């Protein structure tokens, strides 16, 4: 860590992304190792790991911290990724030697701001494109369990779960995401939807989204959860998901489940702040007509400059196809 701090420009040597997150193998690797292997480590190894985590997380700064409420500072998908990694990493040594309470509180405050601007209080839509964006649900749940339930309980997060995800779902159970990593045959991240299920266990719409997220060839498909290739700078999302994995509640019949969960949900969704309209002919029919219409270009670091773009599904087929490719 000392060498890393000395190898970057002076203005960056106290930043989490440029030093701590990199040296600790994205932070979570060392933090999860410390948590899960703690009973089996010698005291000497524990001390070294604890010291490394403390050096990387104390008196540091990360994306979105220490800023006034604003769109420019609290909308990037880098925040839940980079600063979210800081949250989970520092919690590995909570109340132990080297734990920086001040940094943790600043991270929690920034998450409150991001769940206001990065995920809209008006519509539940994410500010940036859906393919590279995530609410980082497991990180929101960790904050909730360690003194800060405000982010997971934010209005925008609830609307993301019960409005945005519900309507961006095609009649066949696939989802649309718009930007470089998007497309019309997507699924919500499992670490997000399982976290939402844990946060809102009795919400029928969350169960509907969870059911359609999991209706694949396997409950935990390896390629959807593990890094694309083995490398140290990658996530093990399978471990994240296992923490909050739950069964789906609701009728076994898919059509009946749709009626039960969505009988009072309008067929049309308009996110005026996002410039997005989604409408359909029915909830319970897998062959229903569904239209997605984006009337303006997305802003942010991973924008989708597809002003006027649309996608259309009907009779079991995607006729107007969002093929992704924008960044």
Image (cartoon, grey):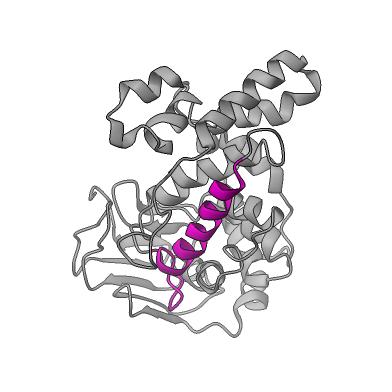
Measured along the vertical axis of the image, is residue 184 above or below residue 83?
below
Is 101 colored magenta in this rendering?
yes
Q: Residue 298: x, y in percent?
A: 25, 63
Q: Residue 84: x, y in percent?
A: 51, 46
Q: Is residue 278 left or right of residue 151?
A: left
Measured along the vertical axis of the image, is residue 31 above or below residue 45?
below
Residue placed farthest to the right in the image?
39
Count all numbered tags in the image, as a single digit: 0
Please give the name of the residue rendered at 46% of the width and 50% of the height, measured from the top-left corner: 80
| Most foreground residue, 193 or 150 | 150
Q: Is residue 73 visible?
A: yes
| Most foreground residue, 299 or 87 | 87
Residue range (magenta): 100-126
| Most foreground residue, 102 or 300 | 102
Q: Is residue 169 visible?
A: no
Please give the name of the residue rendered at 73% of the width and 69% of the height, measured from the top-left corner: 202
Q: Residue 59: x, y in percent?
A: 49, 40
Is 176 colored magenta in this rendering?
no
Please give the name of the residue rendered at 35% of the width and 64% of the height, measured from the top-left corner: 127
Q: Is residue 146 left or right of residue 39?
A: left
Write down the quadrant of residue 207 in the picture.
bottom right
Q: Residue 244: x, y in percent?
A: 70, 48
Please give the name of the residue rendered at 47% of the width and 82% of the height, measured from the top-left corner: 267
Write down the quadrant of residue 217 in the picture.
top right
Write down the quadrant of residue 240 in the picture.
top right
Q: What main secondary structure does the magenta stretch of the protein show?
A: helix
């Amino acid at each position: 860590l000392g060498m890393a701090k000395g190898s970057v420009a002076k203005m960056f040597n106290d930043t989490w992304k440029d030093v701590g997150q990199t040296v600790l193998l994205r932070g979570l690797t060392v933090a999860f190792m410390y948590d899960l292997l703690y009973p089996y480590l010698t005291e000497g190894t524990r001390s070294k790991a604890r010291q490394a985590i403390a050096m990387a997380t104390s008196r540091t700064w990360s994306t979105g911290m220490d800023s006034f409420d604003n769109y420019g500072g609290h909308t990037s998908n880098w925040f839940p990724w980079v600063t979210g990694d800081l949250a989970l990493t520092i919690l590995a040594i909570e109340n132990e030697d080297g734990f920086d309470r001040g940094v943790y509180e600043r991270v929690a405050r920034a998450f409150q701001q991001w769940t206001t601007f990065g995920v809209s209080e008006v519509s539940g839509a994410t500010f940036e494109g859906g393919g590279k964006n995530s609410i980082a649900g497991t990180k929101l749940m960790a904050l909730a369990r360690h003194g800060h339930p405000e982010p997971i309980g934010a209005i925008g997060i609830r609307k993301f779960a019960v409005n945005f995800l519900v309507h961006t779902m095609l009649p066949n159970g696939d989802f649309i995401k718009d930007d470089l990593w998007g497309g019309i045959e997507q699924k919500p991240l499992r670490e997000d939807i399982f976290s939402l299920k844990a946060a809102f266990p009795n919400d029928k719409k969350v169960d509907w989204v969870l059911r359609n997220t999991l209706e694949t060839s396997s409950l935990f498909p390896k390629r959807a959860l593990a890094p694309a290739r083995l490398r140290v700078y990658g996530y093990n999302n399978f471990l994240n998901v296992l923490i909050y994995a739950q069964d789906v509640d609701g009728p076994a019949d898919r059509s009946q489940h749709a009626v039960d969960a969505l009988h009072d949900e309008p067929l049309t969704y308009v996110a005026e702040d996002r410039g997005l309209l989604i409408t359909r002919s029915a909830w319970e029919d897998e062959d229903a007509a569904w239209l997605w219409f984006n009337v303006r270009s997305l802003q942010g670091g991973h924008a989708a400059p597809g002003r006027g773009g649309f996608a259309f599904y009907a009779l079991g087929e995607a006729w107007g196809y969002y093929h992704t490719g924008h960044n």
